[in-house]
Amino acid sequence: MSVEPMRCAAGVIVDDDGRVFIQRRSPTRKLFPDTWDIVGGHLEPGESVEEALYREVTEETGWHVSIVLGTIAELRYRGNDGFERLETDFLIRVDGDLARPRLEAGKHTAFRWITRDELDVFDDQQDMDGGLLRRVVEGGFDLLRQIGL
């Protein structure tokens, strides 16, 4: 059994109005079911973190990464499935119809765009993810402010 954490890449997608895209995980998902999430997932064999980010954005939304604005954080955590992960989170912009993401069937059930004032949307999942997603998205808003966008 590997002692290395699973590598993951995730993107905090920001729009022209400074809002962040989140999507609701299906209640049938093993990891963090029925919680709000950002776009991302595990690296495939031989894939770099950046390659995984680009692939996951397209798979989960139908959009394409246009620019990586910066790295938010690299986080190590243990999911509710018992597996340890090392996740790199990026602040990104995408190309596509931002009003109509193509949510990955069976994996996500809803989406919304939130402002910094709406971070409390993550509060009801505190017991499940320990505030992880709120911290990542808050870090995205902080980085957005730092780079002056």
Image (cartoon, rainbow, N blue to C red):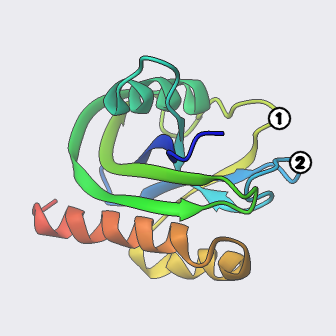
Q: Which residue is mark 1?
A: 106
Which residue is at the far top?
46
Q: Position of residue 32 (x, y in %)?
A: 73, 59
- Find the distance from the CA under tag 2 to the CA under tag 1: 8 Å
Q: Position of residue 44 (x, y in %)?
A: 52, 23
Q: Position of residue 22 (x, y in %)?
A: 56, 55
Kindly indicate the quadrant of the structure image that contains residue 6.
Answer: top right
Q: Which residue is mark 2?
A: 28
Q: Residue at x 76, y 56 (%)?
A: 81
In this view, 121 is above or below 75: below
Near-viewer residue (117 or 71): 71
In this view, 68 is above or below 86: above
Q: Quadrant of the C terminus?
A: bottom left
In this view, 117 is above or below 96: below
The amino acid marked with disc number 1 is Gly
Near-viewer residue (118 or 129): 129
